[in-house]
Protein backbone atom coordinates (compact mmCIF):
# COMPACT_ATOMS: atom_id res chain seq x y z
CA UNK A 1 0.00 0.00 0.00
CA UNK A 2 1.68 3.25 -1.13
CA UNK A 3 1.08 6.76 0.20
CA UNK A 4 -2.04 7.31 -1.87
CA UNK A 5 -3.92 4.60 0.03
CA UNK A 6 -5.55 4.99 3.42
CA UNK A 7 -6.95 2.27 5.65
CA UNK A 8 -10.14 2.90 7.58
CA UNK A 9 -11.99 0.53 9.87
CA UNK A 10 -15.71 0.04 9.94
CA UNK A 11 -18.45 -2.32 11.01
CA UNK A 12 -20.60 -4.39 8.65
CA UNK A 13 -24.23 -3.29 8.96
CA UNK A 14 -27.52 -4.35 7.43
CA UNK A 15 -28.57 -2.41 4.32
CA UNK A 16 -31.94 -2.01 2.67
CA UNK A 17 -31.63 -5.52 1.20
CA UNK A 18 -32.53 -4.46 -2.32
CA UNK A 19 -29.03 -4.67 -3.83
CA UNK A 20 -28.89 -8.47 -3.65
CA UNK A 21 -32.50 -9.63 -3.94
CA UNK A 22 -35.80 -8.81 -5.54
CA UNK A 23 -38.08 -6.47 -3.66
CA UNK A 24 -41.36 -4.64 -3.87
CA UNK A 25 -39.95 -2.29 -6.52
CA UNK A 26 -37.45 -4.52 -8.39
CA UNK A 27 -37.78 -7.97 -10.04
CA UNK A 28 -34.08 -8.70 -9.32
CA UNK A 29 -31.52 -7.25 -6.96
CA UNK A 30 -30.56 -3.72 -7.99
CA UNK A 31 -26.88 -4.62 -8.60
CA UNK A 32 -27.91 -7.44 -10.94
CA UNK A 33 -30.11 -4.99 -12.83
CA UNK A 34 -27.42 -2.26 -12.97
CA UNK A 35 -24.39 -4.36 -14.02
CA UNK A 36 -25.20 -4.34 -17.78
CA UNK A 37 -25.55 -0.53 -17.76
CA UNK A 38 -22.20 -0.07 -16.02
CA UNK A 39 -20.54 -2.58 -18.36
CA UNK A 40 -21.70 -0.74 -21.48
CA UNK A 41 -20.10 2.41 -20.00
CA UNK A 42 -16.77 0.64 -19.36
CA UNK A 43 -16.94 -0.93 -15.88
CA UNK A 44 -17.41 -4.69 -15.82
CA UNK A 45 -18.62 -5.85 -12.41
CA UNK A 46 -19.79 -9.27 -13.58
CA UNK A 47 -17.13 -11.14 -11.57
CA UNK A 48 -18.34 -9.65 -8.26
CA UNK A 49 -21.12 -10.67 -5.90
CA UNK A 50 -24.49 -9.24 -6.97
CA UNK A 51 -25.01 -7.22 -3.82
CA UNK A 52 -23.25 -4.74 -1.57
CA UNK A 53 -21.45 -4.85 1.74
CA UNK A 54 -22.61 -1.95 3.87
CA UNK A 55 -19.94 -0.68 6.23
CA UNK A 56 -20.46 2.00 8.87
CA UNK A 57 -17.39 4.16 9.39
CA UNK A 58 -19.15 6.50 11.87
CA UNK A 59 -18.31 9.12 12.94
CA UNK A 60 -16.41 9.41 9.65
CA UNK A 61 -17.86 10.04 6.20
CA UNK A 62 -16.37 9.98 2.73
CA UNK A 63 -16.54 12.46 -0.10
CA UNK A 64 -15.71 11.36 -3.62
CA UNK A 65 -13.32 13.94 -5.03
CA UNK A 66 -12.09 12.24 -8.20
CA UNK A 67 -13.64 8.76 -8.55
CA UNK A 68 -12.29 6.45 -11.23
CA UNK A 69 -15.73 6.18 -12.83
CA UNK A 70 -18.78 8.44 -12.76
CA UNK A 71 -21.78 7.54 -14.86
CA UNK A 72 -24.47 10.18 -15.27
CA UNK A 73 -28.16 9.63 -15.97
CA UNK A 74 -28.15 5.82 -15.83
CA UNK A 75 -31.69 4.70 -16.66
CA UNK A 76 -31.51 1.17 -15.26
CA UNK A 77 -35.18 0.79 -14.24
CA UNK A 78 -38.59 2.13 -15.17
CA UNK A 79 -39.49 2.38 -11.45
CA UNK A 80 -37.90 5.84 -11.08
CA UNK A 81 -35.82 8.47 -12.92
CA UNK A 82 -32.23 7.94 -14.05
CA UNK A 83 -29.49 8.06 -11.41
CA UNK A 84 -25.82 9.03 -11.21
CA UNK A 85 -23.24 6.52 -9.90
CA UNK A 86 -19.56 6.77 -9.02
CA UNK A 87 -17.01 4.05 -8.34
CA UNK A 88 -13.58 4.00 -6.76
CA UNK A 89 -11.34 0.95 -6.40
CA UNK A 90 -10.80 -0.32 -2.88
CA UNK A 91 -9.46 -3.27 -0.95
CA UNK A 92 -11.59 -5.02 1.63
CA UNK A 93 -9.55 -6.61 4.41
CA UNK A 94 -11.47 -9.18 6.43
CA UNK A 95 -9.86 -11.69 8.79
CA UNK A 96 -6.41 -11.05 7.28
CA UNK A 97 -7.64 -11.77 3.73
CA UNK A 98 -7.62 -8.97 1.15
CA UNK A 99 -10.27 -8.71 -1.56
CA UNK A 100 -10.27 -6.26 -4.47
CA UNK A 101 -13.50 -4.37 -4.82
CA UNK A 102 -15.20 -1.07 -5.55
CA UNK A 103 -16.79 1.64 -3.50
CA UNK A 104 -20.26 1.92 -5.00
CA UNK A 105 -21.73 5.39 -4.69
CA UNK A 106 -25.24 6.04 -5.99
CA UNK A 107 -25.41 9.84 -5.85
CA UNK A 108 -28.06 10.69 -3.22
CA UNK A 109 -29.18 13.80 -5.09
CA UNK A 110 -30.40 11.58 -7.96
CA UNK A 111 -31.92 8.79 -5.85
CA UNK A 112 -35.62 8.46 -5.20
CA UNK A 113 -35.51 5.87 -2.39
CA UNK A 114 -33.24 3.70 -0.18
CA UNK A 115 -31.10 6.45 1.30
CA UNK A 116 -28.17 5.64 3.60
CA UNK A 117 -26.67 7.45 6.54
CA UNK A 118 -23.65 9.38 5.16
CA UNK A 119 -21.37 7.27 7.38
CA UNK A 120 -22.28 4.11 5.45
CA UNK A 121 -20.00 3.01 2.60
CA UNK A 122 -21.39 0.54 0.08
CA UNK A 123 -18.87 -1.92 -1.33
CA UNK A 124 -19.01 -4.25 -4.30
CA UNK A 125 -16.65 -7.18 -3.80
CA UNK A 126 -16.42 -10.92 -4.36
CA UNK A 127 -18.58 -13.04 -2.08
CA UNK A 128 -16.75 -13.09 1.26
CA UNK A 129 -17.73 -16.26 3.09
CA UNK A 130 -18.36 -16.01 6.80
CA UNK A 131 -18.74 -12.22 6.98
CA UNK A 132 -21.45 -11.24 9.45
CA UNK A 133 -23.22 -8.10 10.60
CA UNK A 134 -21.50 -6.18 13.42
CA UNK A 135 -18.06 -7.54 12.45
CA UNK A 136 -15.14 -5.19 11.91
CA UNK A 137 -13.66 -4.82 8.46
CA UNK A 138 -10.90 -2.64 7.05
CA UNK A 139 -11.23 -0.77 3.78
CA UNK A 140 -8.25 0.57 1.88
CA UNK A 141 -9.28 3.60 -0.15
CA UNK A 142 -7.44 5.75 -2.65
CA UNK A 143 -7.08 9.19 -1.05
CA UNK A 144 -6.56 10.72 -4.53
CA UNK A 145 -10.18 9.75 -5.25
CA UNK A 146 -11.84 9.87 -1.83
CA UNK A 147 -11.59 12.20 1.13
CA UNK A 148 -12.37 10.94 4.63
CA UNK A 149 -13.67 13.44 7.15
CA UNK A 150 -15.04 13.51 10.66
CA UNK A 151 -18.79 14.06 10.91
CA UNK A 152 -19.85 15.43 14.22
CA UNK A 153 -23.16 13.95 15.29
CA UNK A 154 -26.01 16.05 16.65
CA UNK A 155 -25.67 14.23 19.98
CA UNK A 156 -21.97 15.11 20.22
CA UNK A 157 -22.76 18.77 19.37
CA UNK A 158 -25.40 18.87 22.15
CA UNK A 159 -22.97 17.36 24.66
CA UNK A 160 -20.34 19.99 23.81
CA UNK A 161 -22.83 22.78 24.55
CA UNK A 162 -23.55 21.43 28.06
Image (cartoon, rainbow, N blue to C red):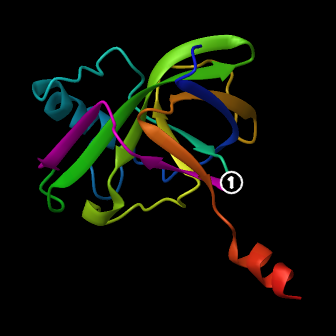
Tell whether 22 sits left or right of 69: right
Residue ID at (35%, 61%): 108
What residue span does the magenta drawing correspond to?
59-76
- Residue positioned most to the bottom: 162
Which residue, given by chain and number where applicable, does mark 1 sit on?
58
- The answer to if 63 sits in the magenta stretch is yes
Q: Between 66 and 140, which is closer to the camera in this rendering?
A: 66
- Residue positioned most to the right: 162
Query: Residue 151: horizontal and vertical position, in percent?
Result: 64, 62
Whether residue 76 can be seen here: no
- The answer to if 155 sits in the magenta stretch is no
Q: Quadrant of the C terminus?
A: bottom right
Q: Main secondary structure of the magenta part?
A: strand
Query: Residue 12: horizontal and vertical position, in percent?
Result: 66, 40
Q: Quadrant of residue 7?
A: top right
Whether residue 160 can be seen here: yes
Where disc 1 sits, the SS reads loop
Q: Between 158 and 99, which is closer to the camera in this rendering?
A: 158
Tell whether 92 sits left or right of 50: right
Query: Residue 58: horizontal and vertical position, in percent?
Result: 68, 54
Residue ID at (23%, 30%): 35
Q: Between 27 and 82, which is closer to the camera in this rendering?
A: 82
Q: Quadrant of the N terminus?
A: top right
Q: Is residue 50 above or below residue 55?
A: above
Amino acid sequence: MDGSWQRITGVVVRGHEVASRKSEHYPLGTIEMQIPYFKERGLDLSSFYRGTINVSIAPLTITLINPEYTFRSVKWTTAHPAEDFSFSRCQVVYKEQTYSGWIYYPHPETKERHFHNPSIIELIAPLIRGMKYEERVDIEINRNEISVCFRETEERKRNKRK
